[in-house]
Image (spheres, rainbow, N blue to C red):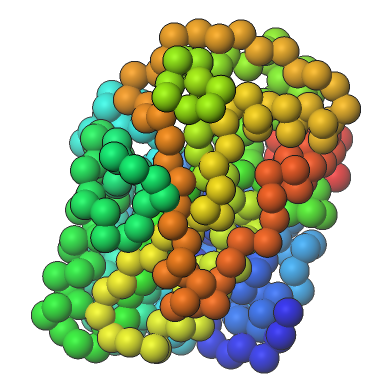
């Protein structure tokens, strides 16, 4: 990886799963990184790990992005060139239970951030969006021009943010914004130092499987085996978090290519079923992991797979890792950190 990049990048949600891996990538590429996070769904210990994995200038401020004064202070203190905005709430089910918190944490925070950026004459932004905005699609792979049909408050917040960003760009040609719609990020840093460590019972399949493997959960509940997919279980486009992090760096590098708002999928273009993922993880950890089929989870769709052509053409990005590697890296993190970041015996 080249280390000739200059510039100071503000990363919001820097202690999160994708944020921390992106900080490592940006630092390794030569950027100076200023991270901010409120640790709502992450651990301060992540910061030491980022510093262990990557050398470079990494500053950190604990703040909530909705606190405009605290955010403005960051822009006064450092010469921010561009922002990568991850900080958000991200659980679909929770968003149905507490919609106002989701609109506040996701939409309000983004409005505030963009306002503070404009006040400080910073108009370069990479926004963390989601394939969730496509909703139940008629066919896969999914291209970026597939109409958005968000089906829950979480995905509506991401869709609203994209529209706000598009409107901002339409009004002022000085803005350069890329919204990255990611598919299903899994895996971990190959060092075993950084990975996914959700608070409470994991909502997502990969951290749940990893916790079964390490003995924290008995078995994986497979949500339905009657979908119109080859083995009847849900198919997703799983993407290694390290590949995803690289996608953010390339999106930053290419922000100057064109003014305005653009939208790019980040996925591998390959679909994997729940049972295939479980088999791959079993191979990685050397033990057949138990599962039980239960009814479908409300709101789930049969298959979501990216058409990743635009990412290749616009950013020169393609995913490197397959599901076997993603499982090996996720297992290594879970094995070395059985109770996650808060395990005193962790690496
Ligand atoms: N699944 C199980 N058992 C589990 C958890 C999940 O069988 O315990 C299945 C789901 O039914 C689905 C697949 O595993 O078929 C993946 O589910 P995840 O919850 O891991 O991921 P989702 O695709 O539902 O959600 C992810 C992100 C969301 C984002 C969404 C876009 O977590 O933030 O992708 O589709 F909105």
- The answer to whether 193 is drawn above or below residue 219 in the figure is below
Q: Position of residue 35 (x, y in %)?
A: 53, 65
- The answer to whether 341 is drawn above or below residue 11 in the figure is above
Instruction: Count the numbered circles shown.
Output: 0
Instruction: Name the residue located 14 percent from the left edge and 78 percent from the top edge.
Output: 170
Q: Position of residue 196 (x, y in %)?
A: 63, 41
Figure quadrant of the N terminus: bottom right
Q: Position of residue 244 (x, y in %)?
A: 57, 60
Residue lying farthest to the front in this orientation: 230
Instruction: Name the residue located 27 percent from the left edge and 74 percent from the top edge.
Output: 261
Residue 285 placement, left or right of 255: right
Residue 343 lies in quadrant: top right
- The answer to whether 42 is drawn above or below residue 253 in the figure is above
Instruction: Name the residue located 65 percent from the left edge and 32 percent from the top edge.
Output: 277
**Residue 109 in sight here:** yes
Q: Position of residue 61 (x, y in %)?
A: 52, 63
Residue 247 lies in quadrant: bottom right
Figure quadrant of the C terminus: top right
Residue 160 placement, left or right of 279: left
Residue 145 placement, left or right of 271: left
Instruction: Name the residue located 44 percent from the left edge and 57 percent from the top edge.
Output: 307
**Residue 45 in sight here:** no
- The answer to whether 178 is drawn above or below residue 291 in the figure is below
């Amino acid at each position: 990886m080249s280390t000739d990049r200059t510039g100071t990048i503000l990363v919001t949600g820097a202690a999160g799963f994708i944020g921390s891996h992106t900080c490592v990538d940006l630092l390794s590429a030569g950027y100076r990184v200023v991270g901010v996070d409120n640790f709502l769904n992450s651990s301060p210990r992540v910061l030491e790990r980022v510093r262990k994995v990557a050398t470079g200038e990494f500053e950190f401020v604990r703040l909530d992005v909705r606190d405009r004064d605290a955010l403005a202070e960051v822009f006064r203190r450092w010469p921010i060139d561009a922002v990568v905005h991850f900080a958000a709430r991200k659980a679909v089910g929770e968003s149905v239970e507490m919609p106002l918190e989701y609109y506040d944490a996701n939409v309000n925070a983004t409005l505030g951030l963009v306002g503070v950026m404009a006040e400080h004459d910073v108009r370069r932004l990479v926004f963390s969006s989601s394939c969730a905005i496509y909703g139940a699609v008629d066919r896969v792979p999914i291209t970026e021009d597939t109409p958005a049909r968000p089906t829950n408050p979480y995905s509506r917040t991401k869709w609203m943010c994209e529209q706000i960003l598009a409107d901002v760009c339409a009004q002022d040609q000085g803005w350069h914004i890329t919204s990255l719609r990611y598919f299903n990020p899994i895996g971990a840093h190959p060092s075993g130092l950084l990975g996914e460590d959700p608070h409470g019972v994991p909502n997502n399949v990969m951290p749940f499987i990893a916790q079964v493997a390490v003995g924290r959960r008995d078995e994986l509940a497979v949500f339905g085996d009657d979908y119109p997919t080859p083995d009847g279980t849900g198919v997703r486009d799983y993407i290694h978090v390290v590949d995803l992090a690289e996608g953010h760096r390339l999106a930053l590098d290419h922000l100057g290519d064109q003014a305005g708002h653009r939208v790019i999928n980040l996925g591998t273009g390959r679909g994997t079923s729940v049972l295939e993922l479980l088999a791959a993880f079993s191979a990685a950890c050397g033990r057949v992991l138990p599962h039980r089929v239960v009814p479908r989870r409300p709101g789930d769709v049969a298959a979501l797979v990216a058409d990743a052509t635009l990412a290749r053409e616009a950013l020169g990005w393609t995913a490197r890792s397959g599901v076997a590697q993603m499982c090996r890296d996720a297992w290594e993190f879970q094995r070395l950190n059985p109770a996650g970041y808060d395990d005193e015996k962790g690496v």
